[in-house]
Image (cartoon, rainbow, N blue to C red):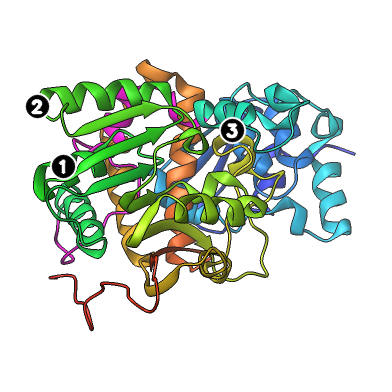
Amino acid sequence: MPRTPVATALASILPSKTRVEAYDGSAAGDPDAEVVIRVRSRRALAHLVSAPGQLGLARAYVSGEMDLSAPNHYLALKTLSRVRMGDLSLPDRLKVVRDLGPEALTWVEPPPQEVGAKRYLAGLRAHTKQRDALAISHHYDVSNDFYGWVLGPSMAYTCAVYPHPEATLEEAQAHKFDLVCRKLGLQPGMRLLDVGCGWGGMAIHAAEHFGVEVLAVTLSRQQAEWGRKAVAERGLTDKVEIRHGDYRDVRESGFDAVSSIGLTEHIGIRNIPAYARFLAGKLVPQGRLLNHCITRADDHSKPIAKRGFIARYVFPDGELPGVAKVIRELQAAGLEVRHEENLREHYAMTLRDWCDNLDAHWDEALEEVGPGTARVWALYLAGSRLAFERNEIQLHQVLAVRTVDGEHGMPLRPDWGV
């Protein structure tokens, strides 16, 4: 019996608004489709059929065995986001495999950008300092030039806060830092501990605009180097120290405020109680803690699929708590929670701007980090934007204070000056 053309077989599991062009010369789907999938080899078929969920699609694209053509990566991923080989019924799945032939059943090595437990984390218990350092280095020590193209001049790799829908990314990032400083009640002469400080954006903003002294800590060596240079260029070396190390190694205490912007996702859900106690112990009486982190939509869904794309390619060992877990552990650590807000839509807008930046610098990104890594980031940013838009994940800021004998030093009903 003659074999079904590759494009025809794949078209049966792809959205109607796509076109498939395959290495065997076959084509199927709408000739005018905005999203075109080009299957370049039999290895692409093996990735698509063998891996669960959307992992196979990611492997085929990252490895270069499959190409996507669309006006932008977001549109491509939005169109393909419902493609899940693992969700097909067994008869339908067997039909696709039969149509594609035996090459679809051949296992092929995942691309080198896929880390997972077998690559370099094996043998180390999750969230030891050594393993956390490796995981952070994998994600953040990519290229400061690359991050600059994606993030823009602010080098802020966390959710921005848009004061109005037409605000630029830079305006929104500055507004986010200002909001955090106001929530923390920063005043000249105060001491701030900024854990998971990234490239130092929060530390620099707090020192420049609120006159505080900052100890900022990051596990990424490249971030620390970039941040120290930025601090020196702004003449803030007497106010800001950016330390390369684990936040758990900070010996100093007596801080008036602690900011944690984008760290909680990395520490592991089971470690949140110790994390909360550690940071609470750094505060003076009436000192405030602002925890800004991505969360899942509830405490019942999976934190992050350990065998999925994000865990294998982007955030090894990353886990997303529910906001209830964060609040519960801050309270258990002796802090009083005074304010909480969900900035989900703001993160979708932030990712929109990051996606646009990457698309605008696509050729430079390919040259700087290579096609495989650039493709990982294109999928990651576009997929994250979709997840925030669909309320699959959220971004919560939780403000807590070290209340002593009922005294917290907070305004009666704050509006944060916004």
Q: Is residue 344 magenta?
A: no
Q: Secondary structure at mark 1?
A: helix
Position of the C terminus, as image quadrant, is: bottom left
Q: Secondary structure at mark 2?
A: loop
Query: Which one is closest to the eye, mark 2 or mark 3?
Result: 2
- Which of the two discs, 1 and 3, labels the residue nearer the N terminus? 3
What label does residue 349 carry, if any? none
- Which of the two discs, 2 and 1, labels the residue nearer the N terminus? 1
Residue at 34% across, 25% down: 224
| Extent of the magenta region | 139-167
Q: Identify the residue under disc 1.
A: 207
Residue type at tag 2: Gly
Residue at 83% across, 43% down: 97
Q: Secondary structure at mark 3?
A: helix
Furthest-bottom residue in this view: 412
Residue type at tag 1: Ala
How far separated are the C-alphas under marks 2 and 3? 32 Å
Q: Is 390 or 187 nearer to us in this picture?
A: 187
- Is most of the magenta stretch helix, strand or loop? loop
Q: Identify the residue under disc 3.
A: 132
Position of the N terminus, as image quadrant, is: top right
Tell me, yes or no, if residue 400 can be seen here. Answer: yes
Q: Is disc 1 surrounded by few (<14), some (14 to 19) or many (20+) residues within 10 Å?
A: many
Residue type at tag 3: Asp
